[in-house]
């Protein structure tokens, strides 16, 4: 793909190119979290299927550019440590004024999540990469240190926020940043939770930004 392609009539050149995992100019790495600062708990497992809609915004124009489908899993190693894994499928449809074909990729990541303040504050340290016919997998490794904060309202409702850096592990790409705000809604958050979330991804040197609107559903298993 020609990386000098324009973003619509605005002529924005490869919006925040360092954000795209070294993949293509049109695929945006996952930056949602869809989790709380709470730990799964020793011996417990959490599964969270989820989907996201990705928008790009610049110069007053906002466009829908990508859809994601994914699955996260968390295994409680101790009451203060989880091991989390994530898979996500990224799909960018073809567009007459941008791209003459669609693009897709698969993203996987793995890392520990550690409790800093019980049920209130945690840090998540995943490393991930992407693969597929439209990307250079060797250039796609990134480290996403993430701070998670949870504000419990009741056993059935919580407010979750997160802030992260998306740090490429290969030179020549910019570090980008994301913040997210979401909810946990349930009859019993320890057993399951509906997780709507929105967030923004930006480059401090860029002119535009990306938005996501996501929905996940967490199921918890074990004692």
Image (cartoon, rainbow, N blue to C red):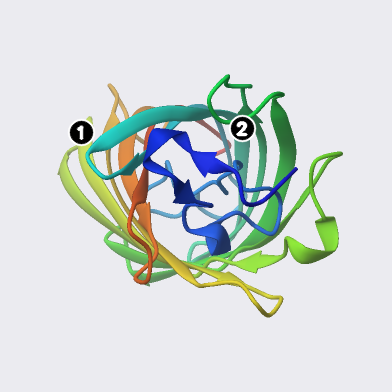
Which residue shows up at 65% across the image and 77% down it? 172
Which residue shows up at 79% across the image and 48% down it? 135
Q: In front: 137, or 150?
A: 137
| On screen, residue 146 above or below 74 | below
| On screen, residue 69 above or below 122 | above
Instruction: Give the SS element for disc 2.
Output: strand
Residue 157: mark in rendering: 1
Q: In front: 163, or 117?
A: 163
Horizontally, residue 156 falls left or right of residue 33, namely: left
Screen quadrant of the N terminus: top right
The image position of residue 82, as x and y in percent, is: 57, 59
Q: Are marks 1 and 2 in contact (CB under 8 Å)?
A: no
Q: Quadrant of residue 192?
A: top left
Observer able to see residue 19: yes
Instruction: Give the SS element for disc 1.
Output: strand
The image position of residue 142, as x and y in percent, is: 64, 66
Identity of the residue furthest to the left in this view = 153
Residue 70: mark in rendering: 2
Q: Quadrant of residue 143?
A: bottom right
Q: How many marks?
A: 2
Q: Residues within 10 Å of mark 2 (few under 14, many from 20)?
A: some
Which residue shows up at 27% across the image and 53% down it? 161
């Amino acid at each position: 793909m020609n990386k000098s392609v324009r973003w619509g009539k605005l002529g924005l050149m490869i919006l925040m190119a360092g954000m795209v995992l070294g993949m293509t100019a049109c695929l945006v790495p996952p930056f949602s979290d869809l989790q709380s600062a709470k730990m799964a708990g020793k011996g417990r497992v959490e599964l969270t299927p989820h989907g996201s809609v990705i928008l790009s915004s610049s110069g007053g124009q906002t466009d829908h550019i990508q859809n994601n489908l994914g699955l996260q899993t968390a295994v409680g190693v101790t009451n203060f440590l989880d091991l989390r894994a994530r898979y996500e499928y990224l799909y960018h449809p073809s567009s007459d004024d941008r791209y003459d074909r669609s693009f897709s990729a698969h993203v996987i990541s793995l890392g520990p999540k550690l409790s800093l303040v019980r049920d209130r504050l945690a840090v998540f340290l995943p490393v991930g990469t992407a693969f597929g016919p439209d990307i250079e997998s060797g250039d796609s490794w990134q480290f996403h240190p993430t701070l998670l904060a949870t504000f419990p309202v009741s056993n059935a409702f919580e407010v979750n926020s997160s802030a992260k850096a998306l740090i490429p592990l290969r030179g020549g790409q910019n570090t980008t940043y994301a913040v997210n705000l979401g909810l946990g809604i349930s009859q019993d958050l320890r057993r399951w939770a509906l997780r709507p979330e929105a967030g923004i991804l930006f480059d401090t040197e860029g002119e535009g930004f990306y938005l996501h609107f996501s929905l996940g559903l967490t199921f918890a298993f074990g004692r």
